[in-house]
Amino acid sequence: GVQIRAAVCMAVFNKILVMNAVSLSHTSNGQLLNIIGNDMQKLMDFLNAFPFVAVLIIDVLVITGVAAYEIGISAIPGILIILLAQFFQIGLGRRIKSLRRRALVFIDARVRMVGDVVTGIRVIKYNGWVVPFLKQIAITRARELSWIAKASFMRGVATAVGDAYVPLACLATFGVYVLLHGGNLNAKSTFTVLPFLGVLYKSAGSARPGFLIFGEAMIGMDRVQRFLNIHKSALHANATVKAVSCSFTWEPSGTKGSSRQLGQPVLRNINLEARKGELVAIVGSTGSGKSSLLLGLLGELKVLRGSYSLQQDAVYVPQQPWIINDTVRNNILFGSDFDLERYQSVLSACALDQDASCFPNGSESEIGERGINLSGGQKARISLARACYNASPIVLVDDPFAAVDVPTTQHLIQHVLGGVLKGRTVIIVTNNEMCLTMCNKVYRLEYSTLHLSEAEKEINRGLVSYNTRSSLESSQQSIEHTSPVVLNTTNAQLQGSSGSLCALTAGDYWLSVWTDKKYNLQAGLYVAIYAALAVGFLIFASLRVSLFTEATNNAARKLHSKMAENILRSPVTFFDHNPTGRIINRFTKDQSAVDEILPFTLQQVIAFVGSCLGALALIAILLPWFMLVTPIYLMVFIYMRQRYVAICCDVKRLDGVSRSAVYAHLVESIEGVVSIRAYGAEKRFMDRFVNLVDKNNQAGMMYAHASRWFATRMEMTVIFNLAVVAAFVIALRNSISPGIAAGIILVQSLKLSGLFQFTVRSSAEAENQFTSVERIQEYTHLPVEPDCKDSSKLSVPNEWPHQGTIEFRNYTMAYREDLSPALNNISFTVEGGEKLGILGRTGSGKSSLVAAIFRMVQNDACSGSIIIDDLDIQKVKLDDLRRRLSIIPQDPVLFRGSLRFNLDPFSEHSDKDMYEALARVHVAEKVKSIGNGLDSEVTENGNNFSLGERQLICLARTLLRKSRIVILDEATAAIDNKTDRLIQSTMREVFESCTCLTVAHRINTIIDCGMVLVLDTGGHVVEYDSPYNLLK
C-alpha cells in the first residue's frame, strides 16, 4: 500500500509538471491536496485491508466444509446468513461510496476556501472580512458534514450488522439442528462448530474495513484517473522567437463567467519575431493580454491556429514574482552551479547587494513561504536575478518595474537590460519610457491583436510612463507539541454498547445452559430466548451507532469551527512562520481523521473492550481459578500496549510533520509551475517531491513494522493463555459440567485470542488518531490578535472617523522583539482630507507604515501611538478599526467565488452601486460583457483577470466602502499610464474630502499630494514636506 501510494503521488506530481496553464486552471489547489492527502490515504487503507478479504473467502470455504461434516445440512442456514451479510455489506459499501462522492464536492470546496483564506489573509484582515469568510466556510462545512454523517451512519450500520451476524448465524444453525434432531442440542457438535463460527467472525471483522472503504478508494482512484487524463502541455523544445498568424485561447471548453471568453481566442493573428540578441518590448493597455502572450509563447495556452517557435529554451520572469521557501541565494541560483563572480555581478545588476547586506545572514538568509517577509520590490528583483543568473539565451520578462522605485528602475534598465542580459534575446512587457528607448522593436497589443510599432510613437500615445527592509528571519519550527484531548463522545457510545454487550454475553451463556438442559424447558423456548438475545444484540448495536454518529459529528463540527475561527483571528506573524501546507494539512488529513477514521476506530475500541470484559467475566464466573492468572495476563498486555503506543504515537507525529512538507512543496510547485518549466527545473522539483514522499513513507513503514512486532507477541501471549485455561479445565474436569467445561470456557478463551489483539491494536490506533485531534486542538488554542476577545475595547460611533486626521507619535514597530525596527521613532501628522504621498527605497518601511495603521503587528517591540480623530487606535475594537478604513493593497487579491462577493462580502450594496463603482474604474463594460455580470465566477487567485484588472476591481471595492481614510499601497503599479491618468482623475473626484495615504513609485501618482513623506532604509522619516519644497 505504501509503495503504490508513493507511485500514484509521483504520477500526479509529474502530471502537474507537464500540464500547461490552460489544463491546470481546471484543477484547484484544494482538489490536488485532497487527491494527495485523503484519496491516496483511502487507497492505501484499502490495499492494506484487501488481503483480509482474500483470507475471509478461504475461511468461509474451509469452515463450511468442517461445519457440514460435523452437523450436516444444519450448517447451511448459518453459512448462508454469513454470506448474505457479506453481500449486504458490499451493498452498504456502494451506498457509502455514493455518499462519499457527494461529500467530496464540499470537502474540495472547503479546502479551496481555506487555501484562499491563508493565501489572502492580509487582505481579509485589512478589510475586516473575518466574519463573512468564517460564515462561508461554516456553510460549506455544514453541507459537507451532512453527507459525512450519512456515510458514517451507514458505516456504523455495516459494523453493527457485522457484529450481529454470528449470533444470528448461530441461531439459524442450531435452530435447524434442533428441529432436525428432535429438540436435542448436542454439546459436542455445538462447541465444535461454535469456535469455527468465532474464527469466521474474527476473519470477517478483519475484512470489514476492506468492504467499507472499497467504494471510497475507487472514488479516489477515479479522481486520480480523471486528473491524469487531463490534456498535458504541448511545450516546444525549439535564440529566435517567432509566431506566425497565431491565435491563442485560455479555455479549450470554457469556464463559466471567465473574463477570458470560453473557447474564444484571447489573442488573434499574432505575428512576432525576436532575433538573437534583440530587446523586444510589448506594450498595451491593462487587460489587453500582454501576460497571456508570454504564456502563449511558452506553450501554456491552447493554440487555435497558426504556429510559433522558441528555437532554444527560454526562462521566464512572471508579473507576480514566484519565490520559494529557501534562502535568497538558492532562489537566485535555482539549481544552477554557484559561480561567485557571476553571482555578485547579478546581485549588483539587480540592486540586491545593498539589500543583502541588511539581511541577518546576507544572501544566505531564509525567506518565508511566498517571500512573505520581503517587500514587493525585493521579490521582483530576486525573480529578475534568477533569470539573469541562468544562462538561457532567451528571456521573457513580464512587467518587472511595477513594484520598484524610480532610481532602482533606472539602475535595472541600465545594468540588467543594458548589462547582464545584453546579447540575449529578451521579450519584455513594460510601460516604461526609458526601457522602450533601448528596444530594437516595440509591439503594441490592442483588441487582442499585435502590431509592430515604434518607441517614440508609443511614448506619445501615452500608454507608457517614466516609472516613478523587512525581517527575513523565518521560523522553521513547527508547532508540534501535544496536549491532552478528550472528546465528549464516550458516554454516547457506552449507552448503546452496554446493552449489546449484555445481550452478546448472555447469548453465549444461554448456549451452555441449552446444551446442558439446565432447566426443564421445551426446545422451542430455548430457541426463542436465544433468538430474543440475538435480536436484542442487533437493536442495541444499532442504537450505539446512532448515538455515536451524532455525538462524533457534533464534536468534529465544534473542533473545525473553533480551529477555523482561531486561524482567521491569529496575527499575521503566525502565517509568516507556518507554511500553507502545514496549515492546510490540519484541514485535510487531520480533519478527515477526526470526521471519519477516529469515530469508526472508537466504535471498534469500545465494542472490543466490552466483548473482552464480557468474555472475561463469563470465564471468571464459570472458572474462578482463572482469576489467579488474569492479572498477570492483563499486565503483559498493558506493558506491550504501552510499548506499541509509545512508538506509534511518535511515528504518527512524524507522519504529520513529513506530510505537511509534502503539501507545502506541492502548493509551491503548483503556483510556480510555469517558472519551473521555463527554467527546466522539473527534475529537481520532482526529485525533491520524491524525497519528501519517501520520508513520509518511512513513517508509514515504521508504523507497519511496529504493528507486525506487536501482533507476533500478542499471538504468543494468547497461545499461552489458552494453554493455561485448558490446563485448568483438565485439572477441574470432575467439578465442571462437560457442556460448560468443553464448551463455553474454551470457546470464550478462543474468542479472547482475537478480541485482545483487536482491542489493543484498535485502541492504539485510536490513540494514534488522537494525534490528529491534538494537532487540531493545538490550532483551537492559538493566540489570537490581542483584542479579539477583549470586551474593554471601545465601540466607536458609526460616523468615526469623521475628520480623518492621523497622527503618529514617536511610533516604533518591529515584526518581532528580536529584530531591528521596521519603523523607528517616527512622528508626523496628516490633517483630515489631506493627501500624503509616501516614498522610499524598496524595504524602507512604506508597507510597514500601512500595516501599523491597521494594527497588523502588535507586540512588545511596538511603542508610541497612532491617533485617528483624537482616538488612540489601540483602544478601538480591531474589526471596527479595519472596517472604517480602506486599502488597495500592493498585491491585489481576489477570492474564488462570485465577483459580487469580492466587491461586497457583507451584501451591503445594490447592483447599481457596484456597477457605478466598476464604471468609475473603467471595468464595468468588461464585467457586463462576460455573461453573468456581477455573478461571474472568479477563479483561484483571480487568475481569470489580469493583474491590472484585479487592481481596478480592488479599487472599485474601496469606492464602495466610502471610508474617510483611504490607503493606496502602490495601487496602480500594474496599470498603464493612460488608465492610470483616468484612475487618478476618478480618485481626485471621489476621494476629494478623504484623507489619502499613497505609497507609490511613480512621480505622477503622488504629484497631486499636498505632502510627501520620505523614509530611509532604517525606517526613519528623513523628509516630510510639500512636493514643491522637496523638489527645490
Image: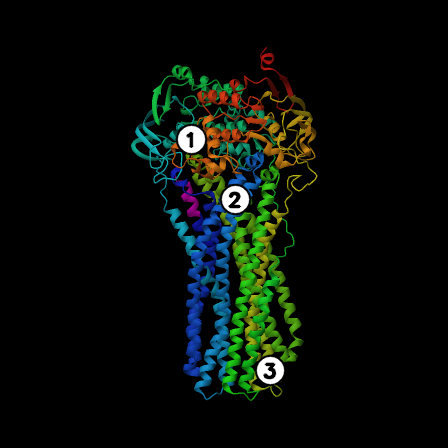
Magenta range: 10-19
The quarter of the displayed image where residue 875 is located = top right
Type of amino acid under label 3: Val
Residue 310 in view (yes/no): no
Type of amino acid under label 2: Gln
Please tell me whether mark 2 or mark 1 is closer to you in this view: 2
| Label located before the other in sequence (2 or 1) | 2
Q: CA distance from mark 1 to mark 3?
A: 82 Å
Task: Say if the magenta span includes residue 11.
Answer: yes
Q: What kind of element bears circle 3?
A: helix
Q: What residue does disc 1 label?
A: 315
| Label located before the other in sequence (2 or 3) | 2
Task: Say if the magenta span includes residue 344.
Answer: no
Q: What kind of element bears circle 1?
A: strand
Type of amino acid under label 1: Val
Measuring from the top left, give residue 296's x and y in whole percent.
Answer: 37, 32
Q: Residue furthest top?
A: 1032
Q: Residue at x 45, y 46 (%)?
A: 31
Q: What residue does disc 2 label?
A: 136
Measuring from the top left, give residue 386's x and y in whole percent.
Answer: 48, 30
Q: CA distance from mark 2 to mark 3?
A: 65 Å
Q: Is residue 513 above or below residue 990?
A: below
The one nearer the camera, 566 or 707, is 566
Q: What residue does disc 3 label?
A: 729
